[in-house]
Image (cartoon, rainbow, N blue to C red):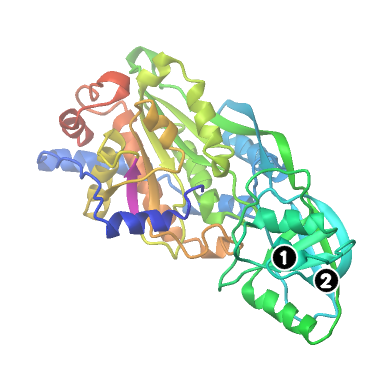
Amino acid sequence: MKKSILSIAFASTLAFGAIGTPAVLAKPVSVSQTQQVKYFDNKVINLINVENIYNNIAYLSKVPRVAGTPAEDNAVQFVKAQFESYGYEVKLQPFTYYGYTPPTKMELTVNGFDGTLQPASFTYTVSGNVTGELVYAGLGKPEDLAGKDLSGKIALIKRGDISFADKVLNAAAAGADGVIIFNNTSGAVNGTLGAANDNYVPAVALTQAEGEALLAKLNAGQTFTATLNIEGARTGESTSHNVIATKKPTNQKKATNDIIVVGAHHDSVSGAPGANDDASGTAMTLELARVLKDLPTDTEIRFVTFGAEELGLLGSYHFVSTLSDDEINRTIANFNLDMVGSRDAGDLVLTTLDGKANLVTDLARASSERLNGEPLPVYEGGRSDHVPFAEVGIPAALFIHSPSEPWYHTPEDSIDKISKEKLQDVAEIVGTAVYDVARFDNQGPKPKKSAKGKASPEQIHEQAIK
């Protein structure tokens, strides 16, 4: 999920006192109304099978699903097949974009070195398979390279003073066939070369400990031959897809004119299996589609998994751009499921683009209060697929646990970190919230919408509990 470490965003929100606007309290309900709500909730809850969600996460998270790669295409076909197995007609919505595709394979071997090396890639690094003598080149500044002939060699460079891109370009200008940059502080390097450049040579990053171990051996007089192999990295036009399964109202004569969108992104970042980010949301979208398929509803529900979220919400922006003005005005809710299953993340929260309550947060807060005894908190937050919907006036909210797990966007985001209890909880809250507004049995009129599909808080709370 492209959130610039969303846990930091939440921490900043709490630390600096930016408090999301809580929803207006619902009016008291009678005992008979409460029993009625529980009955309709159970029509959804009794159908949820958390094993389905878990097993689909396990399949999707076998390998990283980077946008524009065969692995993402495989995920798209899997999601399509699952929707079809539930009886949906499915639409694949392709879109093209110009951008960087990270490596599908990255290897670094140093003959004679007995330590462990786990290279990381830089955004915009190039593919290549090079072998050469490993040579230390300081910080990679021009004065560090003055008088050095790096022809056919691989430069070992320390982080600091100048950009990663300048280090690679300076070394390449001195003849280097490859570059290894090691950190100057603890932790992994999560870096970028900034933009594509034809003068780049293959480059990878190492931790401070890994780089200093190599440097110590070189300073002791040992010589090494290193081989750097990067495959699949490229900059250019790529294609990704959204996957759309639509549940039409059960009885068109009694249908509303409303649309609900339930969705998640199916892509992940390079090197991360993405079990929680966001195979969890994708698998939950699939299960809710299965659960709601044969329940009577008077509202159109579109279940969508988005491509290329990690590259800047590209799939959801494309999806929203294809909606007509009429569809935008008729879309009353977007439920966005992103990172909803990690055992090591915090509590479930809701975020909206402006931090204010809307139909989605009000329905979900009412649902969580019925099921768990307390409403979910609402905070301000973007950087996920609810943003494009909110920007055109569609009530939208992100469902996520905060703070995020420590292995967000790392190879450790794997199936063994997934909590079935959290999956069950989120599926129940979202499923009953969607059904609460979409079911035929919803007594009284639907919430009236203002411009661009919004409902007033008073209208929302009068209707959401009925």
* Label 2 crowd (10 A; few <14 / some 14-19 / many >=20): many
Specify the amino acid type for callout 1: Glu
Name the element at disc 1: helix
Relative to the observer, which residue lies in front, 80 or 293? 80
Boundaries of the magenta span: 348-352
- Compared across the picture, whether 277 is left or right of 359 comes to right
Name the element at disc 2: strand
Query: x and y percent of residue 157 in the render?
Result: 71, 67
Query: x and y percent of residue 200 in the render?
Result: 76, 50
Q: Main SS of the magenta segment?
A: strand
- Compared across the picture, whether 403 is left or right of 448 comes to right
- Tell me the residue at 68%/55% (across/down): 166
State which quadrant residue 77 falls in.
top right
Relative to the observer, which residue lies in front, 416 or 142? 142
Relative to the observer, which residue lies in front, 231 or 175? 175
- Tell me the residue at 83%/66% (across/down): 147
Look at discs 2 and 1 and give the one toward the viewer.
Answer: 1
* Label 1 crowd (10 A; few <14 / some 14-19 / many >=20): few
Q: Is residue 64 above or below residue 88?
A: below
| Residue at which label 1 appears | 143
Whether residue 245 is visible to the viewer of this picture, yes or no, is no
Instruction: Please say whether residue 450 is one of the residues in the magenta stretch.
Output: no
Query: x and y percent of residue 245 in the render?
Result: 53, 29
Query: x and y percent of residue 325 in the render?
Result: 41, 15
| Residue at which label 2 appears | 134
Q: Is residue 463 above or below residue 152?
A: above
Marks 2,1: beta carbons within 8 A: no
